[in-house]
Image (cartoon, rainbow, N blue to C red):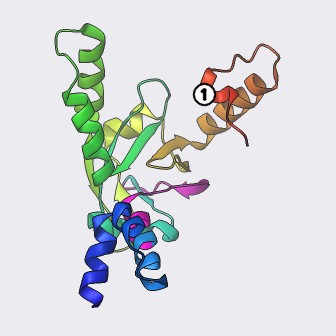
Amino acid sequence: MSKQIINLAESGRKWFFVENFGRKSQILTIQTEKRNKFMFRGASAVNLDAKGRISIPTRYRAELLEQNQGQMVCTVDIRQPCLLLYPLQEWEIIEQKLLELSNFDPVQRSLQRVMLGYATECELDSAGRILISGPLRQHAKLEKSIMLVGQLNKFEIWSDAEWQAQVEQDMALGATDTFALSEKLKTLSL
C-alpha cells in the first residue's frame, strides 16, 4: 500500500484530485512538490575565505544535497555586478532555454556567450561551502563580505558594498512617483 501511495505522490497533482487516498497521500504530495521546486528566500551575510569559498546557509544544505547531490552552477548576471547561483536542476532549465536561442541573432548570441561562457559547476563540500572561480569573483567584485540573496529558484551573490548600493537604488526608485509599473506589477498585491 505505501508503495502505491508514494507512486501516486510522485506522479503529480492530477492523481491527487482524481482520488484522494486520505491525509497520508496529501502530505506525501506536498512534500514531493516542495522537493522538486527550490525556494530560496532572504539575504544572508557570508564571508569569502582565502581560497574563494563561501558557505551556503545551513537551512538550504540538506535539500541541495538531497535533490542535486550538492551540484550547483554559478554564472554572471549580465545586467548587474553580481553572480547567479543555481541548483543543477534549475540550471538545466536555463540551459535548455539558452539552447533554443538563435546563434544568428547578435543579442541572443551575446547572451549565450556570456551566460554559458562563465557558467561554472560548483559542488558543496563536506562543510557546506562552494568554491567561486577567480573570473566570477572578479566580475562581482567579491572580496571578504558577501551577500547571498535568495531569488526563489536561485541565489544572487553580491559584494556587500554593491548590494547596499543596489538596495538603496531600488528603494529610491520605488519611492518616486515616476516608478512605472508593468501590467504584471499593477496586479501584484504584497
Residue 120: quarter of image: top left
Residue 166 percent coordinates (x, y):
64, 31
User: What residue lies at 30% left-to-right and 79% top-to-bottom?
Assistant: 6
Decide if residue 91 is in sight here.
yes
- Looking at the picture, tell me which residue is in the foreground, 164 or 179: 179
- Specify the amino acid type for callout 1: Lys
**Image vertical order of residue 136 relative to residue 124, above or below:** above
Position of the C terminus, as image quadrant, is top right
User: Quadrant of the rendered structure where residue 77 is?
Assistant: top left
Residue shown at 39% from the left, 47% from the top: 85
Residue, x 46% and y 76% (percent of image)?
26
**Residue located beneath label 1 in the image:** 184
Position above or below: 88 against 68: above
Question: As drawn, is 183 to the left or to the right of 156?
Answer: right
Residue 53 shown in magenta: no
Q: Where residue 55 appears, x then y in whole percent?
A: 45, 62
Q: Is residue 125 visible?
A: no
Return the residue nearer the eye: 133 or 43.
43
Farthest residue toward the front? 18
54 and 56: which is toward the camera: 56
Dot 1 lies on which element? helix
Query: Badge 1 local density, few (<14 within 10 Å), some, or many (20+)?
Result: few
- Tell me which segment is drawn in magenta: 31-51
Question: Where residue 183 appears, x then y in whole percent?
Answer: 62, 22
In the image, residue 111 above or below residue 129: above
